[in-house]
Amino acid sequence: MKNKNSKEQNPMISKVNEEERSFAIRLMQHLVVPTFVLDPECKVVIWNMACERLTGIPASEMIGTSDHWRGFYSTQRPCLADLIIHERTRDVNDLYVWNKNIEKVPNGLYAENWCVMPQLGTRRYLAIDAGPIYDETGRLISVVETLRDITLQKEAQSALQDLAAKDGLTGIANRRSFDQALATQWQRAMRETHPLTLLMVDVDHFKQYNDTYGHLAGDECLKRIASAMANTPLRAYDLVARYGGEEFAIILPEVTAAGAQAVAERIRAAVEHLGIPDTTSEAGVVTISIGAATANALIGSTPTQLVAAADAALYQAKHAGRNRVVTVNFGTPQDPVR
């Protein structure tokens, strides 16, 4: 007896399967979500209309090729679907460096990345999902990759992060960022037994300057001083922050007391050289005073004590005539001058 379930005896089964496949392809082609599908040889078998709109590349240029990367990057590199096909999912962290929260999803991958979109000449931030499709025997037959343009959300998030991290007037790091950075660098200095230096900076006679020239001039003065300090040659991991009012703070990891004196003097001179007129100042221009404290042995002490030491050195600089730098090694008794 012939098998009634065989395709030879049931041509309708083959017809139904083909109709279902054709419908699935048409459905995918018209999805509003940009989607492309690769076969096990990483050849494009579907490049839907939404993907054409996203990348500016028609399906006719993609079908049957392995050039899908051209839609998103200027140089050849794997997409998520390629990583699944080649069983290289561990490489996702190296290839999607812009994403801080890369995570695996069931039977696939999820990542986010900045893409340069070479055909359109635009830079877009895409959320990307890629999932494998297997046949009934467990053989991989294709991988589907979908993309969502979340550039606006990313830019809004970055703007909010800037607002949270930067001072609204001067554009440099704010007090919150300073506190976080000091705690981080303190722990690092303790772990690696490196020195940590803190500069506390105060604008000389600023209240008198405000009273004489007005608050708008005072704001402009603070902005110019912040810019001068930020543009003084510093390392990428040094931090210049507005501590509050007319007071600033600069964190200098791995800098000794001698190095702190040199850096602080460059910053003091840079502000003086701005030449902001100030008839209330002995120098005739706006100047700053700087207190520098360097911690060489952090065990048993706290970041708050380092701030207090730098602040005490700052008071000494102001008491000694202003427009100068006073440097101390953390732990040396210093009596604040009121």
Image (cartoon, rainbow, N blue to C red):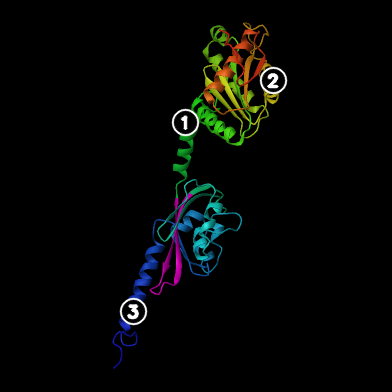
Residue 316 falls in image quadrant: top right
Q: Tell me the quadrant of the picture where the C terminus can be found.
A: top right
**What's under tag 1, amino acid-wise?**
Ala
Q: Residue furthest front?
A: 300
**Residue 164 tag number:** 1
Q: Is residue 261 left or right of residue 239?
A: right
Precedes in sequence: disc 2 or disc 1:
1
**What's under tag 3, amino acid-wise?**
Lys
Precedes in sequence: disc 2 or disc 3:
3
As helix, strand or loop, the secondary structure at mark 2 comes to helix
Q: CA distance from mark 2 to mark 3?
A: 84 Å
Mark in the foreground, 3 or 1: 1
| Span shown in magenta | 126-148
Label 1 crowd bin: few (<14), some (14–19), many (20+), radius 10 Å: some
Q: Tell me the quadrant of the picture where the N terminus can be found.
A: bottom left
Label 3 crowd bin: few (<14), some (14–19), many (20+), radius 10 Å: few
**Residue 84 tag number:** none
**What's under tag 2, amino acid-wise?**
Glu
**Relative to 63, residue 301 above or below:** above
Q: Position of residue 182 (x, y in %)?
A: 54, 29
Identify the residue under disc 3. 15
Identify the residue under disc 2. 265
